[in-house]
Image (cartoon, rainbow, N blue to C red):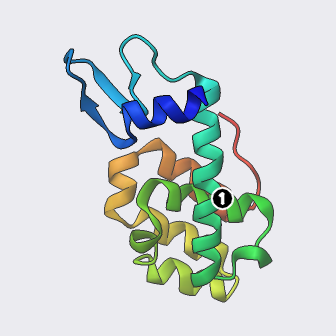
Amino acid sequence: MLIEQLKRHEAFRPDVYLCTAGKPTIGYGRNLEANPITPEEAEVWLRKDLEVIQLELKRHFNYTRLNDARAAVLINMAYNLGVPRLKGFKKMFAALEDGFFEKAAKEMLDSRWATQVGNRALELSEQMRTGEWQSQ
């Protein structure tokens, strides 16, 4: 009953807003200044976001035939860019369709995204090229 009462009193807000005391708040009145999210909570959100991304990605590209390291590159990029923008990497996807991983890796680096994310792009392109996880 307490939960339902608090939900009714606080009302859900999906975006950060300033409460009447001027504190950044989200959800059902969670004061982010006094009670910031923990790494564990952030990881729960991350895992949920990745589930959604993987479902969306599967609707547009059959990445299940890639090994785990290469599939993870696409998921990582989709997490960063969003699936709609990732779909813009048409030459990379064409190379993947043909199994040309080195070309796919080069296409990843030949993008504005690569200049924006720097080392992330270098690591992911190498992972795509080799099919092996890159350790940093």
In the rendering, at what x and y percent does residue 81 appear?
Answer: 42, 59
Give the residue number, with chain letter if any, for mark 1. 51
Q: Is residue 99 above or below residue 82?
A: below
Number of numbered markers: 1
Q: Say whether residue 27 is visible.
A: no
Describe the element under mark 1 as helix, strand or loop: helix
Could you tell me which residue is drawn at 46 percent across and 53 percent down?
A: 80
Residue 32 x, y percent position in the rendering: 39, 20
Corner quadrant of residue 43: top right
**For this view, does 4 lie left or right of residue 67?**
left
**In which quarter of the view is residue 24 placed?**
top left
Q: Quadrant of residue 124?
A: bottom right
User: With 43 as the anchor, is 31 left or right in this view?
Assistant: left
Q: Residue at x 47, y 72 (%)?
A: 107
Name the spot of residue 57 as percent of width and height, x first.
59, 73
Camera-nearest residue between 17 and 119: 17
Which kind of residue does numbered mark 1 sit on? Glu
In terms of depth relative to the viewer, which is nearer, 58 or 34? 34
Q: Is residue 82 left or right of residue 3?
A: left
**Above or below: residue 56 compared with residue 129:** below
